[in-house]
Amino acid sequence: MKYLFDPDVKVLLPDGSTRRLVDYLAPSTLLLVAALFLVVSIFLPYWRMTMFAPQYPKGLRVEVYVNRLEGDVSEVDALNHYLGMPPLDEGGQLERSISVAALVAFGLLLVAAVFTHNQWAGLLALPVLAYPVIFVADLFYILYTYGHSIDPKSALGGAIEPFTPPLLGEGAIGQFRTLAEFGPGFYLALAAVAVVLAGLWLHRAAYKPIVDARRQVAKPPA
């Protein structure tokens, strides 16, 4: 391992020039680290909401993982039932059913990018770069749908206007107050994006000279 990262170890390019071996190991290592971040994020909450009510002064917490909900889900559902809101588990069922497979697939795409020594590596990494944005957009849609599905025939439904629970920060509806925040799983996914971007930058710096050298060697003499 020490030999591999020795800065004096060189790689011969097609045009006869040389570059350090570490220049090629660094982007590969970063892409593999990003893949690991994504897999680990599966086991961590991506988003959490704490609901405060007079009868629950310490609050009720619901944690959203990519494939499940945990926490005081049944208690929150019981309270929301009086507002005519659907059970929490009804939102995002499709997303939760495919999320683990999707994240594993994203990790495998990053592994494939390690062995792709041209501009196609960026295309393989594109789903990972878009993933946090897609997650936030989908969560907002679920929250919007959830807050706009109030049954006016419920006990308190007629007194509550449709609303969208906040993605981040505090919100209030009637006597209930909520605090929403992103969890470590989401921040780990963001870290994966940052690592991928750094890896792709180093990947281009390492392999573009090889691609250019091959083109130069293959170019017919004038």
Image (cartoon, rainbow, N blue to C red):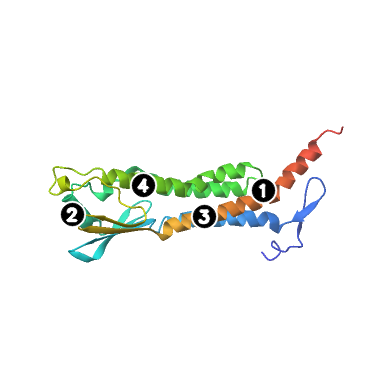
As measured in the structure, the alpha-carbon distance from the residue carrying label 2 to the one carrying label 4 is 22 Å
The residue at 64%/42% (across/down) is 119
Which mark is drawn over residue 192?
3
As measured in the structure, the alpha-carbon distance from the residue carrying label 2 to the one carrying label 1 is 54 Å
Amino acid marked by disc 3: Ala
The residue at 55%/57% (across/down) is 33
Compare marks 1 and 4 and give the one earlier in the sequence.
Answer: 4
Which mark is drawn over residue 204?
1
**Left or right: 34, with 172 as reference point:** right
The residue at 49%/46% (across/down) is 130
Q: Examine the rendered structure and indicate whether residue 46 appears above or below residue 213.
A: below
In which image quadrant can residue 51 be found? Answer: bottom left
Q: Secondary structure at mark 4?
A: helix
Amino acid marked by disc 4: Phe
Q: Secondary structure at mark 1?
A: helix
Q: Which residue is mark 2?
A: 78
- Observer-nearest residue: 115 or 61? 61
Disc 3: CA contacts within 10 A as few (<14), some (14-19) or many (>=20): many
Compare marks 4 and 3 and give the one earlier in the sequence.
Answer: 4
As measured in the structure, the alpha-carbon distance from the residue carrying label 3 to the one carrying label 1 is 18 Å
As measured in the structure, the alpha-carbon distance from the residue carrying label 2 to the one carrying label 3 is 37 Å
Q: Secondary structure at mark 2?
A: helix
Callout 2 touching callout 3 (CB < 8 Å):
no
As measured in the structure, the alpha-carbon distance from the residue carrying label 4 to the one carrying label 3 is 22 Å
- Observer-nearest residue: 99 or 50? 50
Quadrant position of the N terminus in the picture? bottom right
Amino acid marked by disc 1: Arg
Q: Position of residue 206 (x, y in %)?
A: 70, 51
Q: Which residue is mark 4?
A: 140
Q: Secondary structure at mark 3?
A: helix
Q: Position of residue 155 (x, y in %)?
A: 12, 48
